[in-house]
Image (cartoon, helix red, strand yellow):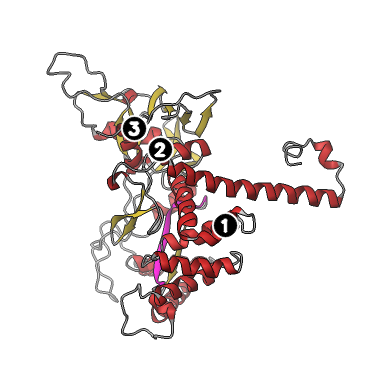
Amino acid sequence: MIETLAGPGAGEVEDLTAAGLLATIKASRDAEQAEAARQLLLAAQWADLHPPESIHDAAVFSIPAGGREHEEPIAGEGCPLVAEFCVAELGGVLGVSTTAAKKLIGHSLELRHRLPRLWAQVYAGRVPAWRARAVAETTIHSCPSLTREAAAFVDAQVAAVAGKVGPAQLDRLVAEAIKRYDLAEPDPTADPEDGWLHVDPRHASIDTQDVHYAGTMRMEAELGIADALDVDRALAHGAATLKALGSTESLNVRRAKALGDLARTQTALDLHTQGTGTAATDTDTSTDSDTGADPQRLPAAREVVLHVHVDATWSGDTTVFGPTGRLEEGQRLVLLDQIRSWCADSRTKVTIKPVIDLNTQLHADAYKVPDKLREQVILRDRTCVFPWCTRPARRADIDHVIPHDPDAQAEGRPQPGPTATWNLACLCRFHHRLKTHSAWRYAMVAPGIYEWTSPHGYRYRRDRTGTSSIDQADPPGIPRPRRP
């Protein structure tokens, strides 16, 4: 029945009655959930085929913490390790990033080895794969880490309700497991009857990679009660101050701007001096009588680095800018009016960099990439050029597509991999290592356009619009090389 419904025509759908339509869409959903469960099973089997040659070759997540990064395994204690480079091959055929493929493999191993009851329910079709993966994500990254016994406790509780637990209930279960198995350091201030206090939920997170088209980012925080009330009072006071100074924006917008003011010195003071006619000019050296501060000697309140690219043309002696530009952070469009507002904001430091022609072929005689050439490659590629990867080019390595030969000059041979525009590409650190130490290969077929070949012969095309598969009827198998 599912095969018949795989590609129904418009007329076939229109002929269905209400009851038939409900039955058809239910069958489609059942097939979708069955395939999602099957993908988990296949991901676990893919992991079984690729054990690491040593613990140093195992796939891990790089987690930022305390200003530094540390590595976490892709699944919890008791799960087998997986060779790090096999993950990219799976992500390629699924059309997802390497990180997403790591999560899929990690969830499948966590379910099979540490949450077997929930795994059995997924395989039997009683629990949707997405519910089980949410549980696995929580048990993998619990802090402190869950032992096999603690994970088994969570598994038994979740399986008893067929996986129907929300995030809050799941957090309570994990907290109870941590308390029950004495996994946390004792807290002298904690209530021994309250398992919640063994897991500190406080955090302040800003998603710097997801930039809204309006030029905003999302911030989320969990604060202590006293801190939260203080912040709330500060935002209410800041919003009221902005309104008193003439702002006509909504309360939510004023509160958001007040939060930005808390991160700097209060720019509302500058608005105040402007509103009362005492704003300092370029030659004014007077001080603010209320604060005793010299506005011209205060440091820049805002030094956030944003890389914005706006198309411009010449019209006579005037530069005409396009209405929109591209913001590198988050790969989003930004309005020219927004850029103007950022530049005009109080005590904002603005840096203008010279325009670099992306069509010019630059080169250097040495292996090291000069700053101008590096900037040109970053602007051209925008992100890591590995299939499906979206990591920003500005934080990536600059790779010689054809490897640079350090001995060529000394031996009187031409350099096969010169440091030139046509031979450089942006690769994030992981995919740079992958290209260097595995059978993945790529070539630049045109400026900013790359064709990749995986160890198993799958081919991908990567350009500014993203990644697409290059059809190949019977991809040849390529043995995975051993690391030196």
Q: Is residue 407 left or right of residue 40?
A: left
Q: Nearer the viewer, residue 285 or 270?
A: 270
Q: Disc 1 versus disc 2: distance between alpha carbons?
A: 43 Å
Q: Disc 1 versus disc 3: distance between alpha carbons?
A: 35 Å
The amino acid pointed to by label 2 is Arg
User: Which residues make up the magenta segment?
Assistant: 201-213
Q: Residue 32 location, x and y as percent? A: 65, 47
In this view, 14 is above or below 338? above
Q: Is residue 38 left or right of residue 413?
A: right
Precedes in sequence: disc 2 or disc 3: 2
Q: Residue 294 location, x and y as percent? A: 24, 67
Q: Is residue 293 left or right of residue 202?
A: left
Q: Nearer the viewer, residue 188 or 122?
A: 122
Residue 241 badge: none
Asked if the residue under mark 3 is in contact with the one under mark 1, i.e. CB atoms within 8 Å, the reply is no
Image quadrant where residue 347 sits: bottom left
The residue wearing badge 3 is 438
Image quadrant where residue 273 sits: bottom left
Q: In what element is the residue under mark 2?
A: loop
The residue wearing badge 1 is 120
Q: Quadrant of the N terminus?
A: top right
